[in-house]
Image (tube, rainbow, N blue to C red):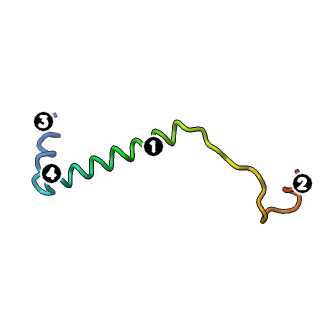
Amino acid sequence: MGDLLVILVIVVAITGFSRVRETARGFRQAVRNFREAVAEPAEIDITPGPGAPERARKQ
């Protein structure tokens, strides 16, 4: 745990706190989007489009 704290202090010293905050915000948004995508059922449209072969449209 102490090693992680040292690494965090070094990253903040090099990049600045605002940059670390932006990165954390982006990471939280990515995790939120991923969880929403996993929770929602997939909506797949199986209707044949205009470029589909004729036999696919008759089914």
Q: Amino acid at mark 1?
A: Phe
Q: Residues within 10 Å of mark 2 (few under 14, many from 20)?
A: few
Q: Secondary structure at mark 1?
A: helix
Q: Residues within 10 Å of mark 4 (few under 14, many from 20)?
A: few
Q: Which mark is residue 58?
A: 2
Instruction: Please state if 52 lies on the left or on the right of 43 as rendered.
Output: right
Q: Amino acid at mark 3?
A: Gly
Give how far across and how far down residue 11 sits, in percent. 15, 51
Q: Which residue occupies 85% across, 56% down?
A: 57
Q: CA distance from mark 3 to mark 2?
A: 67 Å
Contact flag, marks 3 and 1 (Cβ < 8 Å): no
Instruction: Please state if 38 lies on the left or on the right of 50 as rendered.
Output: left
Q: Which residue occupies 11% across, 50% down?
A: 10
Which of label 4 and label 3 is nearer to you?
A: 4
Q: CA distance from mark 1 to mark 4?
A: 26 Å
Give how far across and how far down residue 29 sits, in percent. 37, 46
Q: Which residue is mark 4?
A: 17
Q: Which residue occupies 61% across, 42% down?
A: 42
Q: Which residue occupies 12% across, 36% down?
A: 2
Q: Which mark is residue 34?
A: 1
Q: CA distance from mark 3 to mark 1?
A: 30 Å
N-term-proximal mark, 2 vs 1: 1
Instruction: Please state if 56 lies on the left or on the right of 5 as rendered.
Output: right
Q: Which residue is mark 3?
A: 2
Q: Quadrant of the N terminus?
A: top left
N-term-proximal mark, 1 vs 4: 4
Q: CA distance from mark 2 to mark 4?
A: 61 Å
N-term-proximal mark, 3 vs 1: 3
Which of label 3 and label 1 is nearer to you?
A: 1
